[in-house]
Image (tube, rainbow, N blue to C red):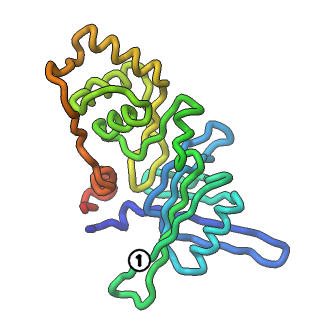
Amino acid sequence: MTNAHLRFGWLTYVKNTEKTTTSIKLHLDRFIGELLPDPPRQAKAHLISVVGGDTQISAISAAISMGDRFMIEGPEVPPTRACLERNAQCFKGSLQLRERKKPLRHLIGISEEFASGSLSANSGKTLLGASDKQFVWASIAHIYGIPGMPEWADWFAGELATHRAVGNALGIGCDPVIVKGTKEEFLDWLSWAVESGAVSIPAESGSIHWQSLSFRDLFRTANQVAGDGGSC
């Protein structure tokens, strides 16, 4: 990946005890979170992805399990305090680079809400990891069990804009969005669209094939914007 470093951010963790001070700063390649209104520059983190050494990654994993806060920053994201809060899940892996004898360690942390999908069910808002209109429509249709076709993505994007039901989330290395609304509201929009002819139902019955999107597809736009050259 050319110029991938241009989209990386930083995660800084500082822990003070009576005898020692622990300070760790790691490369942050992905972050998704909700910016909180009060206090300022604090966020509810939903996904973090960092790389570093064994000791550093172990310390960050322990900090996540204790619900500690981090400082995150990146392209177009000023320093912001963030926390995954309780019951977050951690996944670890290794990255072997040709120029390094020892592999880098990779850690992904995911909030309980993002992992279980309960954010949608409990709050009337859905956090999605990308803003592509095809992905947004497919995700909402799947999460809420709404009948639909891939061709209706433009219509749904227009409805979200009309109702001011979509907003940007805090993201590094991706372009996450928050969609506001309930299943009942989305079905009301769809009912009106069918009656008015804004969307058309196919005359013949049969299977509907949705386009599959890979992680590379979802993150490609953000990669290209950050540095105008971070292509996959």
Residue type at tag 1: Leu
Q: Quadrant of residue 64?
A: bottom right
Residue plotted at (43% across, 39% down): 177
Which quadrant, please, contains the N terminus? bottom left
Residue plotted at (85% across, 73% down): 18
Q: Which of 195 and 163 lies nearest the eye of the viewer?
A: 195
Specify whether 222 is left or right of 211: right
Name the residue furthest right. 18
Question: Is 45 above or below relative to 159?
Answer: below
Residue 161 x/y as whole percent: 36, 24
Q: Which of 232 and 197 lies nearest the eye of the viewer?
A: 197
Residue plotted at (48% across, 55% down): 31
Residue plotted at (61% across, 72% down): 24
Specify whether 46 is left or right of 214: right
Residue 203 x/y as whole percent: 15, 19
Q: Quadrant of residue 201?
A: top left
Residue tagged by mark 1? 95
